[in-house]
């Protein structure tokens, strides 16, 4: 009985994780209403302001965190880099030596 419950739980978790996978961006590389395609610098800026934009998007349905009209990999790289800048994802803590009081 425990094995069946564990198997069902694992299948349920896998289904939840698979439901969160990203799909293709069909408008990547195409221009938005203003005739622009977001590039690296706009991705960097959108990543930096992502926490504020997220809060605003909760109350305003016309605000999005991520620009879908982008040039692809460079926009994505800039976005992730911007998010890392804000949230400190540089891995600085991994190189620190711990000081122990003896």
Image: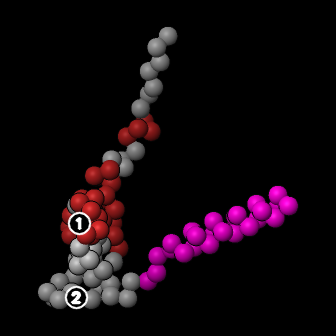
Given this view, does label 1 or label 2 mark the residue nearer the observer?
1
Residue that protrudes farthest toward the top in the picture: 102
The number of discs equals: 2
Rendering coords of residue 87 (x, y %): 32, 50
Rendering coords of residue 23 (x, y %): 46, 81
Rendering coords of residue 39 (x, y %): 23, 74
How busy is the neighbourhood of tag 2: few (under 14 within 10 Å), some, or many (20 plus)? some
Residue that appears at 31% across and 58% down: 83
Residue that appears at 41% across and 38% down: 93
Whether residue 13 is in magenta: the answer is yes
Q: Secondary structure at mark 2?
A: loop
User: Can residue 44 be seen by looking at this rendering?
Assistant: no
Disc 1: which residue: 56
Q: Nearer the viewer, residue 50 or 102?
A: 50
Disc 2: which residue: 31
Q: Range of the magenta residues?
A: 1-24
Whether residue 45 is in magenta: the answer is no
9 sits left or right of 74 in the view: right
- Toward which corner of the image does residue 61 lie, by quadrant? bottom left
């Amino acid at each position: 009985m425990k094995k069946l419950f564990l198997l069902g739980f694992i299948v349920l978790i896998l289904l939840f994780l698979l439901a969160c996978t990203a799909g293709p961006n069909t408008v990547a590389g195409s221009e938005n209403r203003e005739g622009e395609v977001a590039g690296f610098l706009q991705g960097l800026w959108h990543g930096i302001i992502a926490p504020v934009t997220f809060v605003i998007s909760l109350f305003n349905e016309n605000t999005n965190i991520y620009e879908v009209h982008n040039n692809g990999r460079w926009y994505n790289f800039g976005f992730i880099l911007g998010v890392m800048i804000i949230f400190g994802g540089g891995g600085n803590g991994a190189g620190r030596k711990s000081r122990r009081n003896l």
